Amino acid sequence: MTTATLIDSWTMTRRGLAHWARQPVQVAVQLVFPVMMLLMFAYFLGGGMTVPGGGDYKEYLVPGTFALTMVFGLEGTMLAITQDLNKGVIDRFRSMPMARSAVLVGRSVLDMLQSALGLLVLLGVGLAMGWRWHGGPGDALLAIGLLLWLRFAMLWLGIFLGMAAGRPEMVQAVQILVWPLGFLSNVFASPETMPDWLGALAVWNPMSATATAIRELFGSPGGGGGSWAADHAQLLAVCWPLALIAVFLPAAVRRYGRLSR
């Protein structure tokens, strides 16, 4: 990547940061929503939940919510892309003497920064609730790296779907699919408590792989055991996002190159 491309990409990132400064309420809502979900499941429903093999449900829930937040971030990516498309912002940028890749790179950097901030907030809330990681700092950093790796994959999926949808209204159709994907996982409940066919789908969910992997790294209950996917969760937590990136990053770049042709 050339120096000019880096400068243009940083300019696009600064544009997004300026939007944050002008729309603090919207940023706050995006940060608070995952916290509300965590608190509701922990305190409203957590009393009736059990963790196979024993353990505190909040210790099980908090890492799962980290993974859920990384996946749900693609909705924000999609919405930002479709809004820029409909306002003609991307077309104007493409007509300017700037690196063509700067728009996508700037978008990806901005969304990763937002996800890192959201993850930091959730970590703080989890610690305030009594959740702790029980491994060393290296394992904790690896867990955070796996979470951001999943978000990076969801980022490119969101960019591609945003350009394919073309309109903000179509984001709602994708939300209908994203929410079942989030709940059809081991984020809130162990697949062992589900019917066999449903548990098999849940355990192979890419989000379940990341959730199980970070539970192992954090020393939280519910990590591993019961199936090949659960026993090799850390491998799948690397391979699932890698496969998504291999498909949707080049697909997003090609789609971006064909805009307004």
Image (cartoon, rainbow, N blue to C red):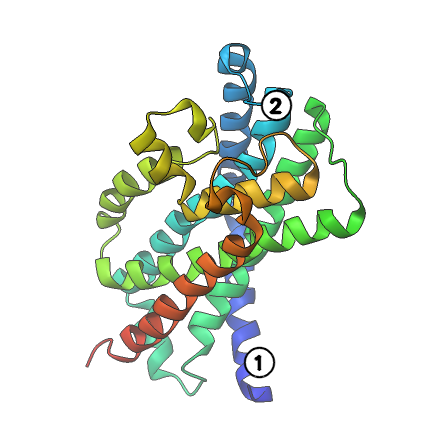
Name the spot of residue 146 as percent of width and height, x first. Answer: 59, 53
Depicted 47 relative to depicted 84: above or below: above
| Side of 222 relative to 159 (left or right) | right
User: Which residue is painted at 34% across and 80% down in the image?
Assistant: 94
| Residue type pointed to by label 1 | Leu
Residue where numbered disc 1 is placed: 6
Depicted 141 relative to depicted 88: above or below: above
User: Which residue is painted at 40% across and 51% down in the image?
Assistant: 74
Q: Residue 35 is drawn in which quadrant?
A: top right
| Side of 261 relative to 59 (left or right) | left
Q: Are the residues flagged by discs 1 and 2 in contact, CB closer than 8 Å?
A: no
**Element under disc 1:** helix
Name the spot of residue 198 as percent of width and height, x first. Answer: 32, 32
**Element under disc 2:** helix
Residue where numbered disc 2 is placed: 58
Q: Which of marks 1 and 2 is nearer the N terminus?
A: 1
